[in-house]
Amino acid sequence: MDIRFTPAEERFRAEARAWIEANKPTDLPDSRDLAVRRDFDVAWQRKLHDAGWAGISWPKEYGGRGATLIEQLIWFEEFARADAPEPATLFVGLNHGGPTLIACGTDEQKAEHLPRILRGDTVWCQGFSEPNAGSDLAGLQTRAVFDGDDLVVTGQKIWTSFANIAEWQELLVRTDPEAPKHKGITWVICPMDAKGIEIRPIRTMSGHDEFCEVFYDEVRIPRRNVVGRINDGWRVAMSTLSFERGTAFLAHQVRLCRMVEDLASLARVTPLATGAALDDVEIARRIARLRAEVEALRSMTYRSVSKTARTGVPSAEASIIRLFFSELQQRVAALATEILGVDLLDLDPAGSRGRSDADPVRGEWAWRFLAAFSSTIAAGSKDIQRNIIGERVLGLPR
Amino acid sequence: MDLTPTAEQEAIQASIRSFLESELPMSRVRAIAEGAPQELEAPWRRAGELGFFGLAVPSQHGGTGYSVIEEMLLFEELGRALAPGPWLGTVLAAHALAEAKGDREAARRADVQAGRSRVALIDVEEGASGSEAKDDRFTLRDLVVADAARAELLLVLHGDAVRLVETSAAGVGISSGQVFDATRPVARVSLEAVPAERLPASAHALRRIGTALSCAEAVGASARLVELSVAYASVREQFGRPIGSFQAVKHRCADMSVRAEAARAATIYATLSLRDESDDRDFQLSVAKVLAADAFVQNAADNVQNHGGMGYTWECDAHFFVKRARSFEAILGSSRRHLDAIAARLRGA
């Protein structure tokens, strides 16, 4: 057992830190216009790509960095520590679509898509969830029938981020309605400009258009876009999801640690009747507990990475870490709203600007608080995570 | 960076576990708690022969020559077994005596390492009312001390000073009555100007080791509580199904395992920080103590609930864990104190 990194790993850290510090963009667009955000992400990804940092976990033969698990850990730590912006619109391509093609795609599919994903030339979105297939994803009903060299798709997907700017979609469709539900699904690359696709934005509780609904009316997709075997899409999709819960998650944990530090800063400058909120014993202890929990989260992540590095298979405790993280994030944001008190209620930028020197993120908490509600729902709700822990980690009966 | 045990460490832990399963099974723990303390004598002696009390003592001083990491594994297993006995005081005394010179100290060291001297731990803040160190004598009024009634020695941490007191010395008063936690019985200890030899060790350093090891004990117990709940929920049937198939129970078990895993990761990291003398070791130990107390206390309570009416009985082992969890919360700094230490660090940041 050892918490120290090897000299080679420390050199890697120094190199990553220096590069990120010198190259990270600081002009994150204020606008919620996705086209603007996309341009920003593409420029940033190009820079990462040209310096050899793109696809940190991708194998070298596909143009990635081919970093070891520990190096990936270090990279994501440094990336988050520098508060470098994530190329959010490119996330699905880099962390789902690309890795799935690497694992299951044909040579043609790889050659066509992987270099473009890595350079940030193409935006991908995800077409998994449906109105009636959320936690029960395998119950998805979007139909696809073969007609000559095409798949003809009819149905609906939901919760699709960036559908309105994406070129490609990783799409799960039902190709055999007679088979058991896990056995009749196919994973296919859907061109988002195909005829018959209609996209409608979904406004979330924060008031922003964060996701889309996607409707398919006899959309024709070439058969060669099927990834893996026909009707084997569930297995193909699971290889994708284990990536989602893999090392890319590390950065969230570092950002959450920063959020707790922001919380302490907020309490330091927020006056109560008796002094600063951070001098209040109860508030200070509650923040301290969150600080302890976020530190434990880091140790859990290190332990999980250690196990995976040793055994070569994803650690079974990934669901434990996800559940702990998502609930912790909500507790952090909720305590901030308590400390803000009536100040939370005024979202007028002029109102928050009054204290902006002392606390630059003061105005962010309202959005963080609302956004945190999604963390126990997206990518497997906390209830599903508890089922997974109960059944797959602890072996309790179904 | 690797937070998984080596093959050798796994082997050590497995052998400790099988020793405790055969020498100190729950039936024997129960017998000890129900009024037969002599039941501990044979396993205690055997643990001494196997070198358990001196795992981190250098081999030239008669120890095994491992580190606090292997001790952590020992205490995790002790917690899993809910082992009674003054393990922590005895192991810390072995640490305190490791560098001691002179024949008397060497003899003491040998006795402690062999388990011939059982050592209860007393932690007194400097300037605490009723405590006084004068020359080689120590005075202490009425302190609640775990395992004092059957100890030959008292290891007194006072400020940064470390002293050893023989319980047979004149001026030592130890009185015990009914106790809350019968697997770790307390007694009231008063010392009236008793001879107290000062050891060349730092009490702060021993408190750190003690915190790490008691956290490991809590981690072992917390993980054991998950196992006990899962085992019961898998066989106990209601409405024609095992109760573990109901989400209300399944999800409670899942939460228990999350707490146990968080506490374990924090404890491993803190103990490694301690071994490596990292700058943030005190912070990491506070983190571990907060998480371990949370895991032990909550898991013990959830385990009672999972056992339903049986969980409320004396016959079920669940109550022993509930009580031991409170013993853990109370020693070497409550969660409150550790939270205050973390808060102070946040204020300074």
Image (cartoon, helix red, strand yellow):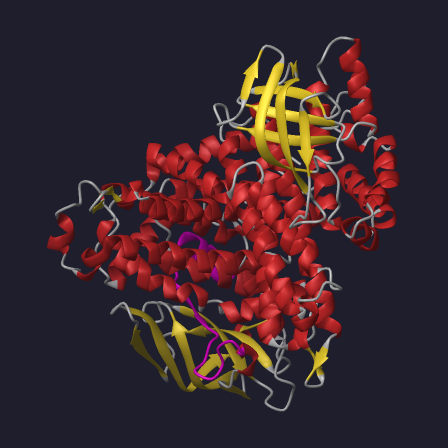
Q: Report the magenta residues as a range.
A: A111-136
Q: Is residue B259 left or right of residue B61?
A: left
Which residue shows up at 30% across the image and 75% down it?
Answer: A201
From what the image shows, is residue B232 above or below residue B226? below
Whole-percent x and y of residue B51? 83, 30
Which residue shows up at 61% across the image and 84% down it?
Answer: A181
Whole-percent x and y of residue B113? 80, 26
In magenta segment, residue A122: yes
Which residue shows up at 49% across the image and 58% down it?
Answer: A95
The image quadrant where one finds the N terminus of chain A is top right
Tell me where residue A271 sits by quadrant. top left
Pick the front one: B142 or A329: B142
Q: Is residue B266 left or right of residue B48?
A: left
Q: Is residue A354 left or right of residue A69?
A: left
Tell me where residue A39 sits by quadrant. bottom left
Query: Can residue B32 be seen from the camera position used here?
Result: yes
In magenta segment, residue A289: no
Query: Can residue A236 be seen from the camera position used here?
Result: no
From what the image shows, is residue A321 above or below residue B14? below
Whole-percent x and y of residue A41? 33, 53
From what the image shows, is residue A160 above or below residue B181? below
